[in-house]
Image (tube, rainbow, N blue to C red):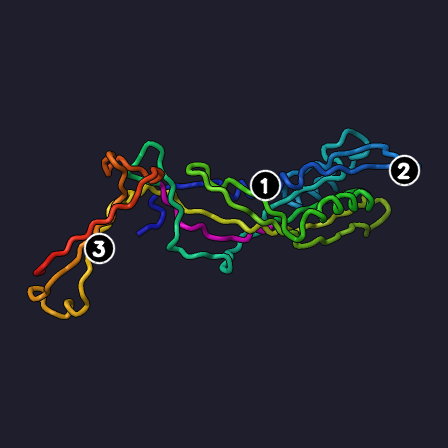
Amino acid sequence: MSIYNTHFYHGLLKKYTTVLGALLDGIDVVRFKADGSEESRTRVPLSYANKEKWVRRIIEDTTMTDRQPAITLPRMSFEMSSIQYAPERKLSSKRYYAFPIQSNTTHKYKVMQPVPYDIIYNVHAIAKTQEDMLQIIEQIAPFFTPDYTVEIRGITNPEIKFDIPISLMGFEPDDNAQGGFEDRRMIIWNIQFLLKGYLFGPIKERSVIKEIDIHIYDMDELQMPQILRNYMVDIGVVPFIEGVPLEDIGPDDPYEIQVTVDYNQGI
């Protein structure tokens, strides 16, 4: 029997990637005059791209300094590098989220406990000078201690919000200064982030439980044949609002609990 009996897609991996990109977007590099005053300010472009193809394009653009370039420096890119199951953050699979359906008092939405995954992102920063690179690094590092927590709307209907910690795992300098004088010098730093995310399964519609019947026997009576048992207790539990039929009571209504007890002799 297939487990894929219904299509679902919450776009969570896309949302996680967008969140990380939004955190890294908006970094400026400032160049100063000899007297320490600001000479120019450049916003560092950020793109989602593979490091090898990205750097190769820059190296092969031999006329980058002679015309309006397709790629300018400094620049940053990032990519999702791995997704790993996180068993230490796993909660009970028997738990679930339940949400009322608007104008529906008999059914509700149900989604099982999400599954935790650690998502690794590699960020690549490239600059022409060490000063530019250090400015980029210093504008990132202080905000991660080592985590930076973001609230995310994981599912929109029904709406589920939860906190996502993003950890800065470290910096790895890669100064490409080797080669002859004709080679272009690039300073590249690799930055790694760990996003502790969750993935949800499908949202299902389930009936609302409104009635509970409990049958209670005396333990000694249970040892006897049914025809010889003296009594049994039936307990009924239902939501109650004066003047409102049971089928019209919704999960969010201010109901009380009505308990009925029946003693059945000679059962």
Question: SS of the residue at dot 1?
Answer: helix
Expressed as whole percent of the image width and height from the top left, the position of residue 255 reads 31, 40
Q: Residue at x 15, y 59 (%)?
A: 232
Horizontally, residue 64 falls left or right of residue 190, namely right
Horizontally, residue 249 falls left or right of residue 130, namely left
Could you say which quadrant of the image residue 78 lies in?
A: top right
Q: Which residues are magenta?
A: 109-120
Asked if the magenta segment contains residue 115, the reply would be yes
Amino acid residing under circle 2: Gly
* Label 3 Cα crowd, 10 Å radius (few <14 / some 14-19 / many 20+): few
- Pointer 2 residue: 36
Amino acid residing under circle 3: Ile
Query: Tag on residue 19?
Result: 1
Expressed as whole percent of the image width and height from the top left, the position of residue 86 reads 51, 57
- Pointer 3 residue: 214
Depth check: give the residue in front, 144 or 106.
Answer: 106
Question: SS of the residue at dot 3?
Answer: strand
The alpha-carbon separation of the residues under discs 1 and 3 comes to 49 Å
The alpha-carbon separation of the residues under discs 2 and 1 comes to 35 Å
